[in-house]
Amino acid sequence: MKFVLFVISSALVLLTLSCTQDKPANQASNQQAKPPGTREPVLVELFTSEGCGNCPPADRQLAFLETQQPVAGADVITLGYHVDYFNDRGWKDPYSSAEYTKRQNSYSMRLKAESIYTPQMIVDGATQFIGSDAAKANGAITKAAVPNKPDISVSINGQSADVRITGFGPHTVATAVLATAEDGLVSDVNAGNNKGKKLPHISVVRDLKPFGKVPEKATEFSGSVELPSDPKWKKENVKHVVYVQEDMSGRIIAVGRVKP
């Protein structure tokens, strides 16, 4: 009986060693521990419209998250997408685009939402809720700030940005995107659901530019992208954000600001 027990124990040890050694290399995390007190970047996207009567509180919530950074341990990076499906209800949103409605539809399919709606807030491409719900926003951002994201470094060369991202953990095929947004925008709405209101906006997306694929087993990425400009934009209020999003799930696996 003692001999049998020894064989069984030895087999268990060998099995454990075998499982450890057979673990795929791409499952090992390449992410490095960051210094204590580091704020982890979290992308918060809001789908909104000036023609939506329920959207102004969510617009204010987005501005609060960006300017006040209320969640400990999180560097909240915000983007506001103005959709175009309210434009036939008395007021055409000057910042709206069918491209942003398409992006929201993609999220709807990925997150298995029954329909698209405004105001919809999405955190790191994974959690969605009504954009004016501060409690849900804080909870989702807190949760998203726990895993370490890859490090993004950007160097500006004239009108181009050279981007290097290191420290990817396990992920599926993803796309690197440059988002250009503008702060300090204000509209005097004279028709539709928000008639008579002055609506301030922050982080209004002006342009989205994919500039590279990140293969499934990649641990780092390098690419260059031209920084868009438009004479209609106030240069001092324009900012750029780089994010990497998994093609299938929509999960944001890296995000960072492009600093001048």
Image (tube, helix red, strand yellow):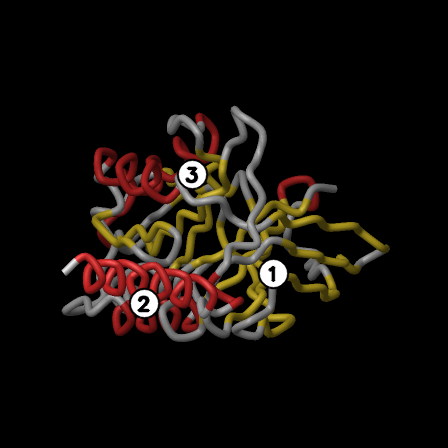
* Distance of label 2 from label 1 (alpha carbons): 18 Å
Residue 134 position within the rendered picture, expressed as x and y whole percent measured from the top left: 25, 34
43 vs 95, nearest the viewer: 43
Between disc 1 and disc 3, whose residue precedes?
1
Instruction: Say which residue appears at 65% left-offset and 46% top-offset.
Output: 234
Identity of the amino acid at label 2?
Answer: Tyr
Q: Nearer the viewer, residue 113 or 216?
A: 216
Looking at the rendered image, the quarter that the C terminus falls into is top right
Query: Which residue, as the protein is rendered here, is positioned at the far right?
Result: 158
* Image point (64%, 51%), residue name: 233
Q: CA distance from mark 1 to mark 3?
A: 24 Å
Give percent across and percent down for residue 164: 71, 57
What amino acid is at disc 1?
Leu
Q: Secondary structure at mark 2?
A: helix
Question: Hey, what amino acid is under mark 3?
Answer: Pro
Q: Which residue is mark 1?
A: 178
Q: How many marks?
A: 3
Quarter of the image where the N terminus is located: bottom left
Image coordinates for residue 195, horizontal then vertical, percent: 27, 46
Which mark is on residue 140?
Answer: none
Q: Find disc 2 in the rendering and name its residue.
A: 107
The crowd level at tag 2 (other Cα within 10 Å; few <14, some 14-19, many 20+) is many
Q: Which mark is residue 200?
A: 3
